[in-house]
Image (tube, rainbow, N blue to C red):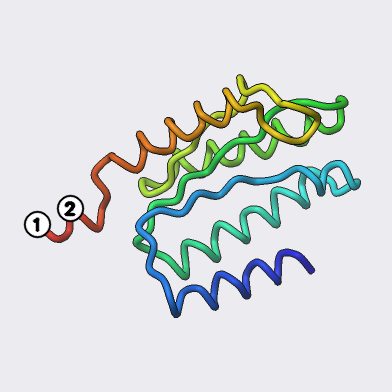
């Protein structure tokens, strides 16, 4: 199971790292392969929960999916993006980057221009004061 594999890697890396920021970019391969949006959202919530448990002081940056493809795929990606945005609004240590206006180079990969824009947006978030930094001055 892919989710369990990712969880095991997160737990393993917790022993050797303590990141201040974690960028999580969801994929929609599961949607293409027939996973229902509800199951995909459920697994994504579990993954975010595991990351928050293992790295409670890390700022989590969620990068939204590019809405493209057939109607089923677009519907699924819109639901996952809505969930990510909702999670970011609920918790102060989660940021969400909307990727709706990004362009794909092909059916899967971001164009060079979209990658550069995404990098600038992630860098802007990373430059914001982080809770761990604020705690040092208390």
Q: Nearer the viewer, residue 31 or 45?
A: 31
Residue at 62% from the left image edge and 23% from the top image edge: 102
Q: Viewed as shown, does residue 86 lie left or right of 137? A: right
Task: Tell me residue 123's x, y (percent).
Answer: 38, 37
- Numbered label attached to residue 134: 2
Q: Quadrant of residue 120?
A: top left
View extreme (right): residue: 34
- Is 1 situated left or right of 63 in this image? right
Q: Which residue is mark 1?
A: 137
| Label 2 residue SS | helix
Crowd tier of the residue under label 1, counting other residues whose Cα lies within 10 Å: few below 14, some 14–19, many 20 or above? few
> Residue 33: x, y in percent?
90, 47
Residue at left 73%, top 26%? 105
> How far across and how far down the image is residue 101, in percent?
61, 19
- The residue that appears at 78% across and 52% down in the rendered structure is 39
- Farthest residue toward the left? 138
> Is there a contact, CB below 8 Å, between mark 1 and mark 2?
yes
Q: Mark 1 to mark 2: distance in Å?
A: 6 Å
Q: Is residue 3 above or below residue 96?
A: below
**The C terminus is located in which quarter?**
bottom left
The image quadrant that residue 79 belongs to is: top right
> Where residue 114 sits in the image (x, y, percent)?
58, 26
Quadrant where the N terminus sits is bottom right
Identify which residue, 75 or 16, lies in the foreground: 16
């Amino acid at each position: 199971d892919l989710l369990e594999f990712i969880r095991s890697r997160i737990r393993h890396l917790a022993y050797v790292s303590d990141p201040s920021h974690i960028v999580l970019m969801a994929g929609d391969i599961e949607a293409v392969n027939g996973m229902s949006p509800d199951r995909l959202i459920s697994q994504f919530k579990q993954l975010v929960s595991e990351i928050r448990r293992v790295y409670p002081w890390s700022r989590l940056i969620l990068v939204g999916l590019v809405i493209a493809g057939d109607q089923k795929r677009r519907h699924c990606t819109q639901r996952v993006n809505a969930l990510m945005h909702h999670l970011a609004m609920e918790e102060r240590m989660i940021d969400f980057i909307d990727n709706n206006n990004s362009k794909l180079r092909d059916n899967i990969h971001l164009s060079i221009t979209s990658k550069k824009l995404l990098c600038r947006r992630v860098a802007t978030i990373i430059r914001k004061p982080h809770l761990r930094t604020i705690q040092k001055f208390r």
